[in-house]
Amino acid sequence: MAVVTDSTSSLRPCEAVEAQVAVIPLQVVIDDESRPESEVDPCEVATALRAGRRVSTSRPTPEVIGATYAQLAREGFDAIVSVHLSAAISGTCGAAQVAAAGAQLPVTVVDSRTVALGTGFAVLAGARAGAVGASAAEVADLVTRQAAASTTFFYVDSLEYLRRGGRIGTAAAMVGSALAVKPLLTVAEGRIQAYERVRTESKALARLAELGLAAWARAAGGSAEVDVAVHHLDNPAGAARLRERLQGRLTDAGEIVVAELSAVLGVHTGPGTLGVVVAPRLPR
């Protein structure tokens, strides 16, 4: 049984290789030049956005996804669980379903209904379960539950990039005042939604830490292990401060992962983004 995901799950290449997870890249388009996300440094996206260049993204085609499924079939796998970012945010899941219909082996497509390491942590949980003999149905169930149990909060310097891509959902009501506030958002019911507004970046960082700590306390009440990640786009100093705030309070927690957002996600959130993901590890 093989596990597949897409590049927005934000897994480091070494993690994906070690977990034997196949990663399908989305595309980043800068000034009409399209490249796989795996070939685009997120800082390049941040620089292009700041310079006002034309930057967009596109999902992998069913043919590209199908080629990965076919390769896994040739390698001898008898089933695939294919886990992707929320279908309410991207058409990747739909493309995977089209590819699955023509695959040579059974493929279960899972809509994670979340993004970034909210998806990535769930993918790794599924890969660990599959490595010790879980069936495709068991892996798909675990991934779905794990992703649903994760919590994601993030801050963007401006809602303009989310507005351009049509991905702000109920946050649209905040656009008119976006220049005067620092929006905090969350992922709920598969969509990016407004959560709170604060006045400064320092207050946004402090509030993200508070929200992350509260999410960890809830998660730790029902799980022996909890994964925590800090995401950013071209904001390493902010990420370091957020990690320090969290690590100083989470004395019983393991290492907090600091991961730059994938280039595709960065296109839609913009430079300066900070976020926190909290994901309890659930039993099979």
Image: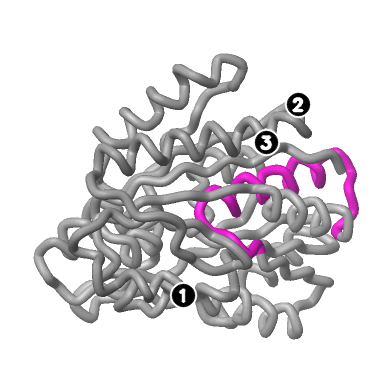
In this view, the mark in front (2 or 1): 1
Q: Position of residue 252 (x, y in %)?
A: 61, 16
Query: How many numbered circles does the render carry?
Result: 3
Q: Report whether residue 158 is seen.
A: yes
Q: Position of residue 53 (x, y in %)?
A: 14, 72
Residue that label 1 marks:
169
Q: Residue at x 24, y 76 (%)?
A: 33
- Please give the residue where the numbered disc 2 appears in the rendered image: 224
Residue 41 in view:
no
Q: Earlier in the sequence, mark 3 or mark 2?
A: 3
Marks 2 and 1 close (CB-CB < 8 Å): no
Q: Name the side, left or right, on which 18 lies relative to 157.
A: right
Q: Secondary structure at mark 3?
A: helix
Three-letter code, disc 2: Ala
Quarter assignment of residue 280: top right
Please, what is the three-letter code of the amino acid marked with disc 1? Gly
| Residue found 12% across the figure and 70% down from its top | 52
**Mark 1–mark 3 contact, CB under 8 Å?**
no
Where's the C terminus, which quadrant? top right
Amino acid at dot 3: Arg
Q: Is residue 125 magenta?
A: yes
Question: Does residue 173 appear to the left or right of 140 in the view shown?
Answer: left
Q: Which residues are magenta?
A: 112-136
Examine the rendered structure and indicate whether residue 163 appears above or below residue 44. Answer: below
Label 3 sits on residue: 218
